[in-house]
Every structure is written in C-alpha cells, then in structure tokens.
Image (tube, rainbow, N blue to C red):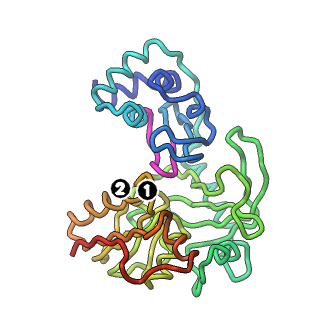
Amino acid sequence: MDRLDVRVVAAGRWPGILLALGVSERALSGKHGPCPICAGKDRFRFDDKDGRGTYFCSGCGAGDGVQLAMAVTGCSFRDTALQIERLAGSVQHTVSKASRSDEDKVAALRRVWSASKPIQQGDEAVRYLTGRGLSLDSLPENLRLHPSMRYCGDDGVLVGHFPTMLATVTDTNGKAASLHRTYLRDGKKAPVPEPRKLMSSGRPICGAAIRLAPASERLGIAEGIETALAASEMFNLPVWSCISTSGIESFEPPAGVKEVVIFADHDLNFAGQKAAFTAAHRLAIKGLSVEVRIPPMVGDWLNVLEARGAPRDGLKSTTRP
C-alpha cells in the first residue's frame, strides 16, 4: 500500500486507529496535554483536521495520522501502513468538523493585522519583553501589538480578550505566511493554557521564520522570539525566530546569507540539540558555513541572559568552516 492509499483508507477513522496503536485517550481528546512523541508537557493537541489525524506539538511540530502512528510505534512506514489497514476495517468512522476555507483564514489574518500597531515603549508587548530581561535598544519592526484579541479554549468557549503581541511568519520566498500570537496580561504571558499560538493561514510554513531584523551575510536563528532577541543582544548579530524545533530543522536562509549561527536550546531530552545539528548538517551540505551554539546550562539563551552570566568564551560550539 502506498502513502496515498493508506491515508484514504484511514480517513475519518484516526481516533480509533491511534487508540488501538497505543495513543492515550487523553492525547486524542483535542485538548492540550503531554506529547505522545516527545513527552513534552502541555504542548500537544490532536485536532484531526478533515479526518486526517492531524496534530501539532510545539516541540515536534505538525503532522498527520500516519506520521503520528509511525512515531508512537517506532515502525517503518510499510509496517505501520499494514497495521493501519488492518485496524481501519474495525474502527468506527467519525465525522470531523468542517475546516475554514483558505480565503477565510487569510481574511482573518488581515483583520488582525489591520487592528494592530507597531510596538512602542511603554506598551504591553515592550513591558513583557523588557520584563524578560531584554534591553530592546531598538524595537523589531516585525512585532506589533493587538489591543484585545479573543482567546477561546479547545471547546470553542471564549476565555477572554487579551493584549497580544503579533509577529509575522515569513516564508522562504519572503512572503507573509502566518501570524504568531503571544497573549499577554499585565506585562506577562496571559494565564491561559496556550499563551503562544500560530494563526491558521492555509499556507505552508516549512522553512519559514519570524524575521526580527534585516538579514546579513551572517545570520542567527533560534526557536522562540524572546530567545532570538536575547541571542541577538548577547552576540550583536541579527537572529530570527523559527518558532519550534521543527522550524529550526526546516529553516531555509534567504539569498545572500553565507553563514548561519544556530542558537540551540539546551534540552534535557536533547530535542533542541538534535534540531540544531540536523539543520547544521543540511545547511552545511548546501555549502553554508554553520555554527551551533548551546547554552552552558539547561535552558535557552534567554535563560542565560536572565541569569546575567552569559559567558563570552568557552561556549559549547561546533563550527563548519
């Protein structure tokens, strides 16, 4: 069975199939919780869009039912497909919620953007960023503040309205692909289950990034916005946010970039390090000079900046000339 066939057979039956393969009911509930792939806390959500078994993890990235089944079973595509085919005939078909059209998604992005303004000194976004220890000598043009965005829970119930820091996610062609949201309250992340979210756009964001500064021949990348700003401040280098480990792994630098510095997270489960070296290997093969920098402590480069002890020498670093 090929990749297309197994997805056709399993369409609309993924909850039952994945449950039979060992994914917990909690993970398939549609609510945020531990990831069955990386075990990260409160970062995974199974949304089963269009009955395709889709999910999103802020650490692992997004995928569909086949990818999730392969990850939790540890089996090859062929062996996983055989299991899926066998189970598909014995589990109940479920009706998935209708997805919004791409036109509706783009219209929503435009409405949100038009209601926002560039961040400025004293506003909620700058209070949040400076509260994390960032100096913000210059304000990134790619960050804006929406005065009051709706936040709904997984059940669709309105939780409240919050000031929201917005960031444009730019694809490899230099075009806006989505908006990243950070919900805020009183200069801190809002007390909601998922204060950071991507808006749906209907466009692929593989290889995309939040461009926090103009590109140069030497460009840095990191996972989160705050981490990227911290690395930029510490090392006097333009650093872009790739949002997640999957974003790091798929990042594509724009034309003119000759050297990429990857400011990896120092994770106990090595997720950040793995993503960094995977990206470094791929970019080095393309002929770029690549350096990976890992914090000397568990955490990210913002944690190092917050500790006010970021070393200038003796960093864990691997360079490909």
Residue 317 lies in what quarter of the image?
bottom left
Where disc 1 sits, the SS reads: helix
- Distance CA(mark 2)–CA(mark 1): 8 Å
Q: Residue 306, percent across and down?
A: 58, 75
Where disc 2 sits, the SS reads: helix
Q: Residue 119, percent across and down?
A: 66, 77
Of residues 27 and 30, which is closer to you in this image? Answer: 27
Image mark for residue 223: none
Q: Is residue 183 magenta?
A: no
**Mark 1 Cα-neighbour bin, 10 Å: few <14, some 14–19, many ≥20:** many
Name which residue type carries label 2.
Lys
Q: Are marks 2 and 1 in contact (CB under 8 Å)?
A: yes
Of residues 219 and 44, which is closer to you in this image? Answer: 44
Does residue 278 sit above or below 226 in this rendering?
above
Q: Quadrant of the N terminus?
A: top left
Q: Which residues are magenta?
A: 55-65
Residue at the extreme bottom of the image, as rendered: 137
Label 2 belongs to which residue?
274
Q: Earlier in the sequence, mark 2 or mark 1?
A: 1
**Mark 2 Cα-neighbour bin, 10 Å: few <14, some 14–19, many ≥20:** some
